[in-house]
Image (cartoon, rainbow, N blue to C red):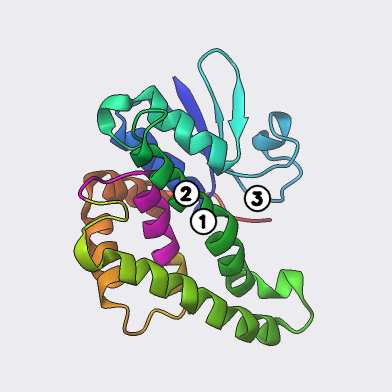
Amino acid sequence: MITLYAAVGSCSLCAHVALIEGGLDHQVRYVTLRAADSPLAAINPLGKVPTVQLPDGEVVAQSMVLLPLLADLAPQAGLLPLAGTLARRQVLQWLAFLNTDVHPAMKMLAGAARYCADAEGLRRSFTPILRGYFELIDSTLADRPWLTGESFTLADIYAGAVYRWAQTYGGPLAGLDRYTAFAGRFEARDSVRQARAMEAACQVPTSA
């Protein structure tokens, strides 16, 4: 069984949805981030989620490594096309953009006080950057239900999670009707509903 270490409201939701979509046998252990006594600290010195421990004991972290691994463990789910194909490169390109550009910018809104004494100034600086990113997503969805076409992939899981973070932390979503409709399709998936329900029922604090 795969063990996923997760935190409510974090990007570990993406790994959880991928596990469910892939029908992979797993359990979820919710942890408190930045807590010295977290069980996560024993296997991941950085104490970050998502982190998984595979049945053979191997520990894998970092979404850009972890999400493709989970998709490859369940190829029948179609979350990531076969190696060497254009379709796979397209999904990975979106995944990299969301993980390395959009997510860090989103953190400047969600946790501005942790990064800068002028929290509101930081938020104002990153809001137009995020707006540009979101407009790219919105325009891409003009002729397709999902980011790379007709099939739901890892990229859509990440983009769906980002939309909810933007809603929660005041991200610039006004007028982005296609991205909003996309988020509705994402939230309607059984895998997302299940993962959201587990987070809602969780009593473990997100951070110390």
Q: With respect to residue 122, does 151 lie above or below? A: above
**Residue 84 drawn at (x, y percent):** 41, 29
Q: Which mark is residue 33?
A: 3
Q: Secondary structure at mark 1?
A: helix
Q: Main secondary structure of the magenta part?
A: helix
The residue sitting at 71% across, 51% down in the picture is 34
The residue sitting at 43% across, 41% down in the picture is 89
Is residue 66 shown left or right of residue 14? right
111 or 32, nearer to the observer: 111
Q: Amino acid at mark 1?
A: Phe
Q: With respect to residue 165, does 84 lie above or below? A: above
Most extreme residue toward the right is 117
Q: Can see residue 61?
A: yes
Residue 80 image-quadrant placement: top left
**Residue 30 drawn at (x, y percent):** 53, 42
- The reply to whether the magenta stretch includes residue 185 is no
Q: Which residues are magenta?
A: 150-164
Q: Which mark is residue 93?
A: 2
- The reply to whether the magenta stretch includes residue 155 is yes
Give the mark nearer the N terminus: 2 vs 3.
3
Query: Crowding at label 2, few (<14), some or many (≥20) Cα neighbours within 10 Å?
Result: few
Give the mark nearer the N terminus: 3 vs 1.
3
Q: CA distance from mark 2 to mark 1?
A: 6 Å
Q: Secondary structure at mark 3?
A: loop
Q: CA distance from mark 2 to mark 3?
A: 28 Å
85 or 44, nearer to the observer: 85
Q: With respect to residue 52, does 101 lie above or below? A: below
**Residue 105 drawn at (x, y percent):** 59, 68
